[in-house]
Image (cartoon, rainbow, N blue to C red):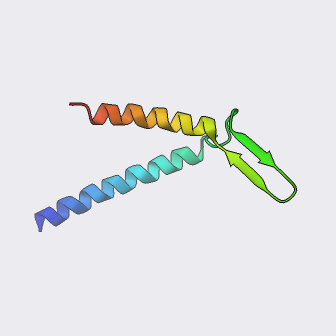
Amino acid sequence: MPQLAKLLVILGIILILVGGIIYLLSRTPLGHLPGDIEIKGKNFRIYFPIISCIIISIILTIILNLFLRK
């Protein structure tokens, strides 16, 4: 039982962190930055969030390097 309790606590912490990240990202202009390409036509819309993807990639690279360093 102590292992199950420990697992539930860890899962709860992970859910809180993910929820906080989603909440903070919803308040940022990520996805609508200058450099993101949007093409509108009469019956269609194409959106390429190039700059947003580059920024997310840089942030994730830094975070993963901090946590996965040996």
Q: Quadrant of residue 68?
A: top left
Left or right: 56 in relation to 68:
right
Q: Nearer the viewer, residue 19 or 65?
A: 65
Q: Decide: is 31 above or below 11.
A: above
Q: Residue at x 43, y 37 (%)?
A: 60
Q: Nearer the viewer, residue 42 or 10?
A: 42
Q: Residue at x 58, y 48 (%)?
A: 26
Q: Decide: is 32 above or below 43.
A: above
Residue 37 locus on image (x, y percent) = 71, 40
Point out the residue furthest to the left here: 2
Left or right: 21 in relation to 33:
left
Point out the residue furthest to the bottom here: 1
Residue 35 locus on image (x, y percent) = 69, 33
Q: Decide: is 69 above or below 12.
A: above
The quadrant in which the C terminus is found is top left
Q: Nearer the viewer, residue 53 or 27?
A: 53
Q: Quadrant of residue 32?
A: top right
Q: Residue at x 51, y 38 (%)?
A: 56
The quadrant in which the N terminus is found is bottom left
Q: Residue at x 52, y 44 (%)?
A: 24
Left or right: 19 in relation to 42:
left
Q: Nearer the viewer, residue 54 or 30?
A: 54
